Amino acid sequence: MTSRDPIADLRRIAFLLERANEATYRVKAFRSAAATVAALPADELNRRAADGTLAELTGIGDVTARCVTESLAGEEPVYLRRIESTEGTDLKGAAAVLRSALRGDCHCHSDWSDGGSPIEEMALAAVELGHEYMVLTDHSPKLTVAHGLTAARLRKQLDHVAKVNEALPEGFRILTGIEVDILADGSLDQEDELLERLDVVVGSVHSGLRDDSAKMTRRMLAAIENPHLDILGHMTGRKVAASGEGDKGHRRGHTRPPSDFDLTRVVAAVAEHGKAIEINSRPDRLDPPKRMLTVAVEAGCLFSIDTDAHAPGQLDWQRYGCERAALCGVPVDRVVNSWSMDRLLDWTVSHSTPG
Ligand SMILES: [Zn+2]
Ligand SMILES: [Zn+2]
C-alpha cells in the first residue's frame, strides 16, 4: 500500500476544524503536529510510527500520532474521515454563482496581529481554495488588544511579504494591505505614506461603537472621503451569537448591537466616492445585516465579500457572505474581489490619487 502524506492530512484536519469554528487549542494540536512531522527525517518518522513512539515527540499527542500512523499506512485517518462526513451542504443558485466568481479575499489576519497562523500558512490555504490573491490586512497600531502593527512593524511586514511572494506558486500573490482603525475624528490610524504604498486599505470602526448617530455618521463619512480608504469593513460593528467556540479576540456568544449612523448618507458617500462596502462573512458578524445591505445595493455601491479570517480554515467562510449577498441581490460585477487582480489594483489606485 502506498502511504499518504501525513502532513497534508494533519493540515487538512486543522483547516476543517477552523472552518467549523472549533476551539483554537484543538486546531493547534494538528498544526503543531504537522510542523513536528515536517521537521522529522523520513526514516525516523517511519521507525517511530512502527514502534508506536510518535507521541513521545513534542507537538504530537495520542490523537495526532494515530492520524500520522494511519496516513503512513495509506489509510485516510479516521479523524479526518469523520469530519469530512459531517461537512456542510453545497451552496445553491445565486450564492454558488457568486462564490465561484470570487478570485480572492480582501480581509484577513496573520499572527503578526491577532491571527493564529503565519502569513505563509494563510497564503497556502488561499492557494488551495483556488484564490488568485489574498490581501493581508493586519490591524493598525491603536488596536493594541489585537497587537496592531506600528509603522515600523508594517514596513518590516512589507519586506517579509515580498519574500514570501517569491516562494509562492505562479499565478498567486499576496497583496499588501491593512485593516486600519477609523479613529474618533474619522482619520485613519496609520502613516499616509504607508497607506499610499499598500495595495488595499480596509478601514473599520473598532471603538466608540455606542456613539450617537450624528457623531458616528461624521466619523464614517470622513473615512469614506479619505482617498486611501478602499473598503469599509464590518460597517455596523455588530456581533451575533455564532456556533462553535470562536478564536482569540472573538469570544463565543459575545453579542453587540449594530452601531447607530445615517445609513442613507453613508451608502450615498460610498457610491459617490467609488468605494466598496465589505460583506463580512464571519458567522459572528454577518455585517451589514440584510436590510442594510439591500439599501446599499439600491444606492449603487460596490462590495467586497471577505472573510476577516484569523486562521487558514476561516478563509473558506466566504460562502456565508455569498449567501447573504445573493439574498440581497448583489450583482456579481459590483463585487470587487470577483475582479482580476489587475482590475482590483487599478480600482484602488483610481481613488487614492487626489484629483
Ligand atoms: Zn482581529
Ligand atoms: Zn475588524
Image (cartoon, grey):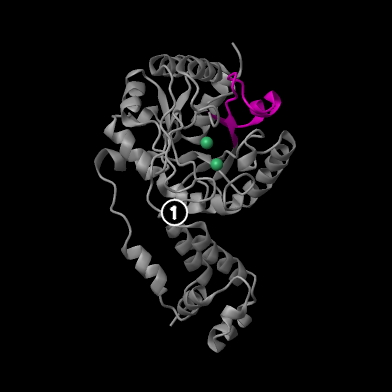
Tell which residue pokes out farthest to the top in this image.
355
Q: Does 195 lie within the magenta span?
A: yes
Q: Is residue 121 visible?
A: yes
Q: Which residue has dot 1 on it?
A: 245
User: What amino acid type should be assigned to the residue bearing mark 1?
Assistant: Glu
Residue 80 x, y percent position in the rendering: 40, 68
Looking at the image, residue 312 sits to the left or right of residue 57; the answer is left
Q: Is residue 130 visible?
A: no
Looking at the rendering, which quadrant does residue 181 occupy? top right
Residue 17 x, y percent position in the rendering: 44, 59
Residue 346 x, y percent position in the rendering: 53, 26
Q: Residue at x 44, y 54 (%)?
A: 245
Residue 128 x, y percent position in the rendering: 47, 54
Q: Residue at x 36, y 44 (%)?
A: 319
Q: Nearer the viewer, residue 278 or 238?
A: 238
From the image, which quarter does the N terminus lie in?
Answer: bottom left
Tell which residue pokes out farthest to the left in this image.
93
Q: Secondary structure at mark 1?
A: loop
Looking at the image, residue 10 sits to the left or right of residue 142; the answer is left
Q: Does 162 lie within the magenta span?
A: no
Q: Is residue 254 above or below residue 295?
A: below
Q: Is residue 221 above or below residue 123?
A: above
Q: Is residue 338 above or below residue 263?
A: below
Q: Nearer the viewer, residue 143 or 123?
A: 143
For the record, the magenta segment spans: 177-204
From the image, which quarter does the C terminus lie in?
Answer: top right
Q: Label 1: few (<14), some or many (≥20) within 10 Å?
A: some
Looking at the rendering, which quadrant does residue 57 occupy? bottom right
